[in-house]
Amino acid sequence: MKKYILKIDCEDEKGLIYRISDVVFKFNLNIEKNHEFVDHNVNKFFYRAEIIAQNEIDILAIYGSLNAMLGGKANIVLKEAKKKDIIIMATKETHCLGDLLIKHDSNELNANIIAVIANHNDLRNLVEKFNIEFICIKSDGLDRESHEKLILEKLFLYSFDYIILAKYMRILSSNFVSNFINKIINIHHSFLPAFIGANPYKQAFERGVKIIGATSHFVNDNLDEGPIITQDIVRVNHEMSWQEMRKAGRNIERNVLANALDLVFDDRVFVYDNKTVIF
Amino acid sequence: MKKYILKIDCEDEKGLIYRISDVVFKFNLNIEKNHEFVDHNVNKFFYRAEIIAQNEIDILAIYGSLNAMLGGKANIVLKEAKKKDIIIMATKETHCLGDLLIKHDSNELNANIIAVIANHNDLRNLVEKFNIEFICIKSDGLDRESHEKLILEKLFLYSFDYIILAKYMRILSSNFVSNFINKIINIHHSFLPAFIGANPYKQAFERGVKIIGATSHFVNDNLDEGPIITQDIVRVNHEMSWQEMRKAGRNIERNVLANALDLVFDDRVFVYDNKTVIF
Amino acid sequence: MKKYILKIDCEDEKGLIYRISDVVFKFNLNIEKNHEFVDHNVNKFFYRAEIIAQNEIDILAIYGSLNAMLGGKANIVLKEAKKKDIIIMATKETHCLGDLLIKHDSNELNANIIAVIANHNDLRNLVEKFNIEFICIKSDGLDRESHEKLILEKLFLYSFDYIILAKYMRILSSNFVSNFINKIINIHHSFLPAFIGANPYKQAFERGVKIIGATSHFVNDNLDEGPIITQDIVRVNHEMSWQEMRKAGRNIERNVLANALDLVFDDRVFVYDNKTVIF
Amino acid sequence: MKKYILKIDCEDEKGLIYRISDVVFKFNLNIEKNHEFVDHNVNKFFYRAEIIAQNEIDILAIYGSLNAMLGGKANIVLKEAKKKDIIIMATKETHCLGDLLIKHDSNELNANIIAVIANHNDLRNLVEKFNIEFICIKSDGLDRESHEKLILEKLFLYSFDYIILAKYMRILSSNFVSNFINKIINIHHSFLPAFIGANPYKQAFERGVKIIGATSHFVNDNLDEGPIITQDIVRVNHEMSWQEMRKAGRNIERNVLANALDLVFDDRVFVYDNKTVIF
């Protein structure tokens, strides 16, 4: 008995969910959960089901039937629920990376960490404690394009599902990002769309805000503008320096990234129109 | 074009959602939203759909087909989405009642307030400002049974969907409550199951908690033990007296009740096993 | 026995708090609470005390001594703690105004509502239920300057402490605002500094955010840029239209404004450098 | 230039803060921050200051003067602000322990981890990665008293400020605890005082709550009843099993413990009457 995840998204049309259900249910498998959503503004349909099946033949048959029915008009994903393979990119900070390493080590992360790529060597010691490959690709003396080319060469050696930017502090070019649409997940150290850009905690301090936040999102083009997965906030006050705000913010960053990854690794997230649907 | 709400709950069985969808979708109506959930622990199935239909005949036909198919084993509700009729019971406090009156007056409450019943006269002036009937039934010199009998006599004069206890400060007997299963909604001035009973703010103060909350729930038997609809919290600190905690708590009480009522009035809530499913 | 509030802010210097305490405490009055804060970045000192005194002579004496000592270099306010007088400005929405009216009517607002000024007549009926003067000053056919002139003429007829913009939907000119520095309090229907400007809920919807917020702040020049008093947030999801986000946002707006006003009306807020210190 | 922390708590009496300020300020040192609070219900006074001083002589002099003045009636602590020494006790779970190890390793914890004591061996590998002593004291075949005796023998070999129960899953006897009053900090896997005792997530699931929380508190006698330091919550819903609630709860447990430890390690917490004052 294995668990499979079926995800479908396509243009909405009348009776679609009935026709999909018709295919899914007539195989008489055990549907643990299913969710659907239609965005009537843009006429988009989203469907996700968790299916328990004993043999792969049923699954292949469902997939075949759905494909025959929806004829290339839909994105259909039907695959065994399993751990994702991820590459983590980082710079020097440990609060997000460390959380992922600990969870990975305790078998509480629904992902395998294939490698950590950093632009500094500071994190090598921590990463290697956990017997995970650490690759340092320094940017010293390199322009962005050359640096990214070195990273891409490494990345293309691996098979992976997602790149996690766990406080990777360099901006990725559109060119780089275009290789991994809906596959790069960032934790932004602020409550987007406020305080885009460098040192958001200092910006927040200077603006005198009473709440700071963090946002996890896909990076599809502009670093701070991709589809938002999840956000959270923490209260701050006049007694706090921007460094104290940053410290308070780190717990939130860590949590928001962790929550976003749980959702993504469980195949609960659809992306469309620079937004997400999350089941 | 009217909106209808279809709610079904019953024992789960394989293919149920397919068979229900089969009925619902073959009428070719516009399904705005639908949600389903199966609680595998207790083998319960829950389904809710918002259906847009032009004529009542289709709706009657769906209802008939579902009934024929599920043969008395399921609770099936299919009715036009419309404002609920409510009776509010209160005592002296205005923070929950006032919010409902304002929203009702501004046409922002998905309910008609039929009357306000109170055990004191303090709120008469406020309620009558809004041209809503105010009924005072004092308990002076009456035992609980006699007092509740007077209230019941009044209640039975009206047709209504829900009784809202907007800070009604007397305990209702099981006998009273048994007349209105899943129809009485209370706002409990604490974060259930903590601080059950009288003066929870004083209890919270004495316990030195750093967060206080409020809980809205159905009252089905024991006053503080019914199915929870929604909860929220607010932070408190050592500088606050219990009166200040109570003041902070009032905003939360008001909000939690408002949120719970929005869910109930939109027919988004199922009750089972002393719990709720909320779509 | 009356309660007095002492507030002092000035340039910080060594021993300042000792010297102030020296004055305050040698009169042997009952200090209920006192807070101080120094912003070392800008060398600013803030002090607030709640003093219980039997006769005004002591209070005058403290005030005199503090003035003598700090010699015009400090802002010193020492006055009886009492309800503030406020003018509310609004347009058509009732969620913030209604909350203030209910609290005022229940004696739970630490302020007297002197009048409500609106640019439409929609709210007249609600306001007059509570026997509060309602003044409609329409802007039809008037340029901003002429409209504001009419409002100013009315405002100057009254004595008041604060103007509360309870969803007043017109932008106030710098010229208008300059008459009431640190005296106009706005509720901004978004989590500043995000979504400045018109229809923030639509902006938030389009950006696909997972949290929306509200901000209460002083209006000192640019409408959306004044010192922030308090902020709060509520979670939203992909199922919500922008109208549903707006509905969710209204509870937050109402609460945030209520919290901000509690702080301001209790004289707990200092403003400096486009920020607030809140004790 | 070193930072010192002065903490005083005693019975309140008129002029106390003035007399203390008199001592503190006349030495003409740099007071970075100071807070005071009087609980008028129980007539208790609390004071905390951060003092920057160049030489220890001034500090000793202040301490001497305060002692002379308050004559044994007050608890006076005046010491250099420095990292606390801590012993962590744990069982098998890594979410709280791992967070402390990562922060410790990154120099972001205001404490030195002296050793980790566990009643199982599962965590050895993780702890030793970070070159921290791991001591396993199994309870197999031992009654509580004997097991605790073995732990106490180990503990008495070390000098430390606090014992952190980072998901130590055995109940400590009153006898054990009495050795370390206000020195043992626990993370309770629920929102106290709700769901005291075993498997709170299952209790929460069965009660159908919509929010779960975590509480960090001192353990002074009864395991779940000590002075609360901080609390936080996370929303849950009907789709979640109790195991999923537990997973959601773990992030909250980790955060709440981290926040509580930040406060304690910065000497911001006073304990009295089974409550805390937190500056």
Image: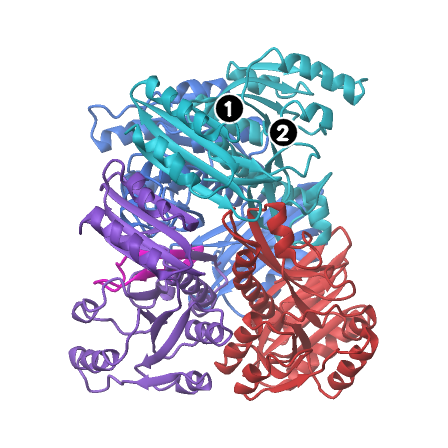
Chain colours: A red, B blue, C cyan, D purple
* Observer-nearest of B185 and D131: D131
Classify residue B214 by image quadrant: top left
Per the image, the residue denoted by label 1 is: C101
Q: Residue furthest top?
A: C157
Say if C62 sits above or below B168 in the image. above
In the picture, measured across the screen, residue A245 lies left or right of residue C225, that is left
The magenta region covers: D206-231
Dot 2 falls on a residue whose secondary structure is: loop
In the picture, measured across the screen, residue C220 lies left or right of residue C87, that is right
Classify residue A60 by image quadrant: bottom right
Residue displayed at 65% across by 52% down: A203
User: Residue B138, percent across and down?
Assistant: 28, 23
Query: How far apart, in angstroms, are the residues tagged by discs 1 and 2?
Result: 13 Å
Instruction: Please identify the quadrant where the C terminus of chain A is shown.
Output: bottom right
Three-letter amino acid code of the residue under disc 1: Leu
Crowd band around label 1 with a 10 angstrom C-alpha radius: few (<14), some (14–19), many (20+) = many
Three-letter amino acid code of the residue under disc 2: Glu
Per the image, the residue denoted by label 2 is: C93
